[in-house]
Amino acid sequence: MAELNTFQYTPKDFKSDQEVRWCPGCGDHAVLNAVQKALTELGIPKEKFTFISGIGCSSRFPYYMNTYGFHGIHGRAAAIASGVKIANPELSVWEITGDGDALAIGGNHFIHAIRRNVDINIILFNNEIYGLTKGQYSPTSEKGLVTKTSPFGTVEEPFSVGELVIGAKGKFFARTVDANVTLSTQIYVEAANHKGTSVIEVLQNCVIFNDGIHDVVTGREVRDDRTIILKHGEPMKFGKDSDKGLVLDGLKLRVVRLGENGITEKNLLIHDAHESNPGIQYMLANMRYPEYPVALGVIRSVEGNTYETDVEKQIENIQKDAKIKCMDDLLTSGSTWKVE
C-alpha cells in the first residue's frame, strides 16, 4: 500500500455537488467536515472509499461525499457494508448510522458485524432521539425522557453504546463530540488504520428535537471538568487545571484530585487501549457524569482476525486440496450419464 501515499487530497476533493440539507446548527455538519479532513490523511485514492448508510438524518451522508456510496434501508447498513467489504476487501468501507438506525431495528446486524470483526468503520451518531421522524425516543434516550412517544417519560433503560460494542467482542471503540473536529479527525484516522470493525460513537446534537442533550458534559464552560480525553500510554488526567485523575480503587474507578491525600500523577491509571482484557476499558466506556467524567478518545483498540481475511484463507485452503478446480470438474464429478 506504500505507493498509495502519493495521493494528495484536500477536504474539498471529498465534497460532492449536492446541497447539504441538514438543519442549520446540526452536529452532522461538523462530523462531515471531520470525516473529509480525515480521508485526506489516509493516502488512499478516492475510488477506494465507499460510504454506506441506513435511514435517518445521518444517513444522508453518502450524498454529500464525493466517493462511492449506497443509501440503504432502515437498520440494514451493517449488513450491506459487510457484504461490500467481503466482496471487495481492498475498499475502505464506512458505515454511517444513528442510535435508532443501528441499535433498534438494526441491532442484530450491528452486534454481529462487530462480533465477526468485519473490517469496516462504523460512525454512530448518538443524539438520543429519532430526529428524521420528528422526535420519538430512541434506544439511547435517558430513562424518564419525555418525547412524542413517551409523553409521561420513558420507562426503559437506555443502551450504552460502548458497553454493547465491548460485549459483542468489539476490538475498537472510540467516542467523540460532534463539535470537536480536531479530536474527531484523529479518531477517524486511527479507526481507518485499524484492521477490523471500528465503532466511533459521536455525541451529536439535534437542534430541533433534542437540543442540548449532551451540554451537561460537552458545554464550553464545563467540558474540561466533565469529560476526559484518553490517550494511549498517558495518565488518565483531566480538569480545567489538569488537577483531576482516575485511579483504580479495588474493582472500581475513582476520581481523585492531584495534591490531596498525597495523590500525584504517578498514582493515576495509565490508559492502555491495546490491552486485550476489556475490564478497565469497559468501565471507562460506561463512565457517566456526575460520578465520573465521560470518556472521549480511543477507549479500546486491539488486534484480531478479520472476518473477510479468515474467509479468504478458508477458501484458499479448501481450493488447495480440492479435486474440483473448475466448473467442468464439478459437472463431471460423482454419478454422471450421457443423454443421447
Image: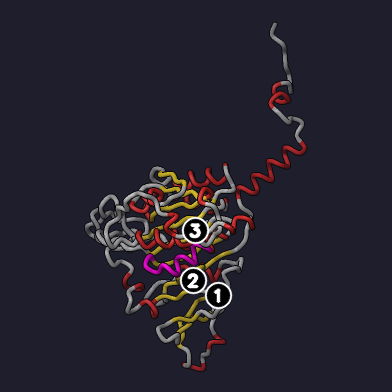
- Residue closer to the observer: 136 or 82: 82
Q: Amino acid at mark 3?
A: Tyr
- Gap in Å between the C-alphas at discs 1 and 3? 33 Å
Which residue is depicted at the point 47% across and 46% down? 68
Identify the residue position indicated by label 2 in the image: 284
Q: Amino acid at mark 2?
A: Leu
Magenta segment, prevailing SS (helix, strand or loop) = helix
Identify the residue position indicated by label 3 in the image: 9
Quick check: can you spot residue 208? yes
Image quadrant where residue 271 sits: bottom right
Which residue is depicted at the point 77% across and 31% down? 323
| Mark 2 or mark 3, whichever is nearer to me | 3
| Mark 1 or mark 3, whichever is nearer to me | 3
Which residue is depicted at the point 69% across and 46% down? 313
Vertical comparison of 215 with 323: above or below: below
* Image location (x, y in percent) of residue 253: 49, 77
The N terminus lies in quadrant: bottom right
- Residue closer to the observer: 280 or 133: 133
The magenta segment = 178-189
Q: Amino acid at mark 1?
A: His
Identify the residue position indicated by label 1 in the image: 271
Q: Earlier in the sequence, mark 2 or mark 3?
A: 3
- Gap in Å between the C-alphas at discs 2 and 3? 35 Å
Vertical comparison of 107 with 154: above or below: above
The C terminus lies in quadrant: top right
Q: Are marks 2 and 1 in contact (CB under 8 Å)?
A: yes
- Gap in Å between the C-alphas at discs 2 and 1? 10 Å
* Image location (x, y in percent) of residue 36: 44, 59
User: Position of 41 compared to 152: left or right?
Assistant: right
Label 1 element class: loop
